[in-house]
Image: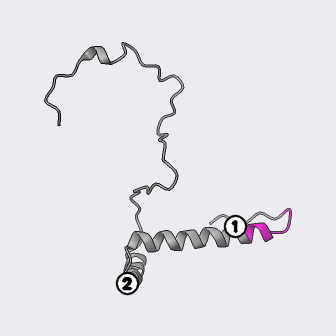
Amino acid sequence: MNDQPIDDLDMPAEIDFSKGIRGLHHIPPGAKVLMPASIERSVWEYFSGKAEQRGVELSELLTEVLKRDIEINEALSSQQPRGLKPRAD
């Protein structure tokens, strides 16, 4: 940490946030996003056991499972006959 005093003149007198979007943050491509999520205990126990068996982190396994789920959903939605909407889960 720098012990030098902060020069207030380095800051602009006003900052225009009129085009800002609340809650919007730039996340670089490929970056990991840490997001707390609540899951049922039985689901946590199941995937924790699978992650331990494979020797991987739980978050790595869950990411893999969710990516596969996305692929399946995308494949199914592209096969959906026109006029029918996929089920909303």
- Image height of 14 relative to 4, above or below: above
Q: Which mark is residue 49?
A: 2
Residue type at numbered disc 2: Gly
> Which residue occupies 86% across, 64% down?
82
Residue type at numbered disc 1: Glu
Mark closer to the chain start, 1 or 2: 2
**Residue 16 counted in the magenta span:** no
The picture places residue 4, in percent across and down from the top left corner, at 15, 25
Q: Name which quarter of the figure residue 60 lies in.
A: bottom left
**Residue sticking out furthest to the bottom:** 53
> Which residue occupies 37% across, 75% down?
41
Span of residues in magenta? 76-83
Mark 1 and mark 2: span between their CA atoms? 28 Å
Between 9 and 69, the one lying in front of the other is 9
The picture places residue 37, in percent across and down from the top left corner, at 41, 61
Between 70 and 55, the one lying in front of the other is 55
From the image, tell me which residue sits under label 1. Answer: 74
Quarter of the C terminus within the rendering: bottom right
